Amino acid sequence: MVTKSFPFSTLARERGEVFTAVDESDVLLERRDAENLWLIRDERYQAAQDALLTLARSMAIVARADRALAEEALAQDLPWLTWLPEAERPQCVGELLDHLVAGADTGELLPYARAKRSWKSTAIAWSAPETARALRRPFPGDGPVLLPPPDEAE
């Protein structure tokens, strides 16, 4: 699918050009002071939503039948996992898979997208040698483990 971009102000000044473009492609309206907006015909939006939810639900079925296979399949799509410490990779894939399965059930996939973005940022941080060394050192303020206060009922 072809995507066309316009400054948001074009919608007010030359909306005919923008709406003509929507007939042929999805349109990205770029805003300076806010998040960009998409204009998309309902037929194309519904088709994408339907396909996405079918794929997410299919992955959920695989995850229920064979969790290890589902995790392996998801990991194949995330080459940046290699930058995470090996001990964190299963946690990342498991968390992402849980969000994907929940999203397939509810239709709400933003938690998956947020978790994926967060884990990817973490992987990128680990990929930088200086940052990785800093992450392995104690952080200022790290101190002894504090026990919770005694229960007043005692």
Image: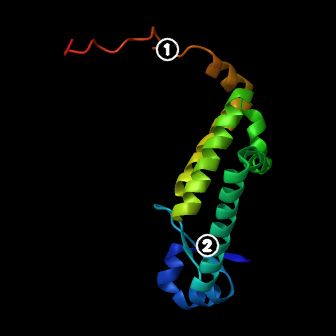
Nearest the viewer among 33 and 51 is 51
Q: Position of residue 77 (x, y in %)?
A: 77, 51
Q: Residues within 10 Å of mark 1 (few under 14, many from 20)?
A: few
In the current view of this chain or complex, which residue is farthest to the left?
A: 153
Residue positioned 64% across, 63% down in the render:
57
The residue shown at (29%, 13%) is 149
Q: Which residue is mark 2?
A: 49
Q: Estimate the spatial distance between the alpha carbons at disc 1 and disc 2, rounded to whole Å.
A: 46 Å
Residue denoted by label 1: 140
The answer to which of marks 1 and 2 sits earlier in the sequence is 2
- Percent across and percent down for residue 38 are 56, 73
Quadrant in which the C terminus appears: top left
Residue in view at x 51 percent, y 74 percent: 8
Q: Quadrant of residue 102?
A: bottom right
Please name the colour scheme applied to the rendered image: rainbow
Q: What amino acid type should be assigned to the residue bearing mark 2?
A: Gln
Residue 59: tell me if it is visible.
yes
Task: Work out whether residue 5 can be spotted.
Answer: no
Q: Residues within 10 Å of mark 2 (few under 14, many from 20)?
A: few
Residue 110: x %, y % from top left: 53, 57
**Residue 42, above or below 34:** below
Q: Position of residue 23 (x, y in %)?
A: 64, 89
- Quadrant in which the N terminus is drawn: bottom right
Residue 115 vs 13, above or below: the answer is above
Element type at mark 2: helix
